Amino acid sequence: MARIDAFLKLGLAQGCSDVHLAVGVPPMLRMSGDLMPIKFRDLSATELESYIDEILTPVQRKNFGDGNDVDFSYVAEDGNRFRVNLFRKQTGVGAVLRFIPNEIPSLESLGLPDVIRDLTDYHQGLTLVTGATGTGKSTTLASMVDHLNTNRQLNIITLEDPIEFVHPSKKSQVIQRELGTHIESFAEGLRAALREDPDVVLVGEMRDAETMSMAMTAAETGHLVLGTMHTTGAVKSIDRVTDALPSELREQTKSFLSTNLNAVVSQVLCRSADRRSRKAILEIMIMTRAIGKLIATEQTHQIPSQLQTGKHIGMQLMDQALLEAVQRKEIDPNDAYTYASEKGPFQRFVTDIDMAPGVDANTVNQA
């Protein structure tokens, strides 16, 4: 058994989401959003490097030795699966290991709005799930793929960096390909996928113009494409796609988005009201004729008003979703205040006065 497994086993017993290892500090656990050290000595460079070396393949060892960051999946001796990011920093080697459940959570168990399930009924077009790193995008997409796999007879191809949730084929055939292992780039994987008779293609990250262009081609030619981006909100996600492609393709890109973009789902992870877990809160934009016109005429700044009035078809602004979750006592109001764009409506719920200068303490206590 690799020695690192002992830290992973301890972390899972405590209910953590991530294990952090760095030189000069003890191992740390991410517990409901907070980073907490375990009772252990500070790790030396030699000790940590020896731990890491035990779980690397020869190819990974060479890549890391060449000075590259390395992303890979690791299966501990007890069968638990982790996504690993290995890097170097000023004080030496560092690693973050994120627990990947062997059982893929259902859309219902995640407490996601019903409209997310409805998005899996599309037969073509582009659906984006966006948000900062660590906001649960991979889990949401895995649940969507599992729903498709369980309910429809499809050829689903996933392009991931690295493979996280493992999808055994059910009604569908699921082909999972990993960056650096099976494909050299997402764009290359997409190009190959189009020759492999796909119905659905999942792109782990739309990070460059070539990948975005290939994803658009796939969506235009009758495939359902699910992709992620590290953007926050529908407007920023749409603007990112438009700005990433060459200026001579700007009109073509706007035309594509206005007719082939199904939805943009942007999410954050908030602590639950009891601070023992975390819950995904979503901003949801569903493509409509009005939104398509705003994209085509470069008036994306008006999209939030469409989200605000489109609740009857499942749309919602992030602030709307946060406020409703606070009122239902599902999430920590302090977290909601942090993520909200307009802070005013959240001030009366805040329990930490230092977070909201100018809030009357009596008002907070009454709330």
Image: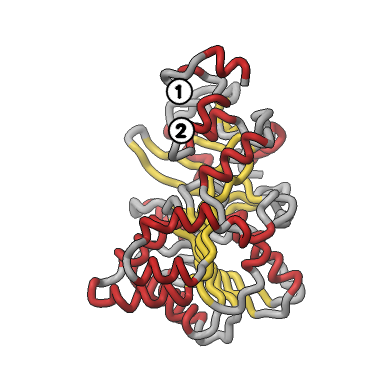
Seen in the picture, residue 2 relative to 13 is either above or below; the reply is below
The kind of secondary structure element at disc 1 is loop
- Residue at 69% x, 65% y is 146
Q: Quadrant of residue 351?
A: top right
Seen in the picture, residue 356 relative to 223 is either above or below; the reply is above
- Residue at 51% x, 56% y is 307
Packing grade of label 2 (10 A; few <14, some 14-19, many >=20) is some
- Closer to the camera, 149 or 289? 289
Q: Amino acid at mark 1?
A: Ala
Labels in figure, total: 2
- Residue at 54% x, 84% y is 222
Q: Amino acid at mark 2?
A: Lys
Mark 2 vs 1: CB contact within 8 A: yes
Residue 356 disc label: 1
Packing grade of label 1 (10 A; few <14, some 14-19, many >=20) is some
The kind of secondary structure element at disc 2 is loop
Which quadrant: the C terminus? Answer: top right
Q: Position of residue 331 (x, y in %)?
A: 63, 35
Horizontal side, residue 286 vs residue 208: left or right: right
Kindly identify which residue carries mark 2. 343
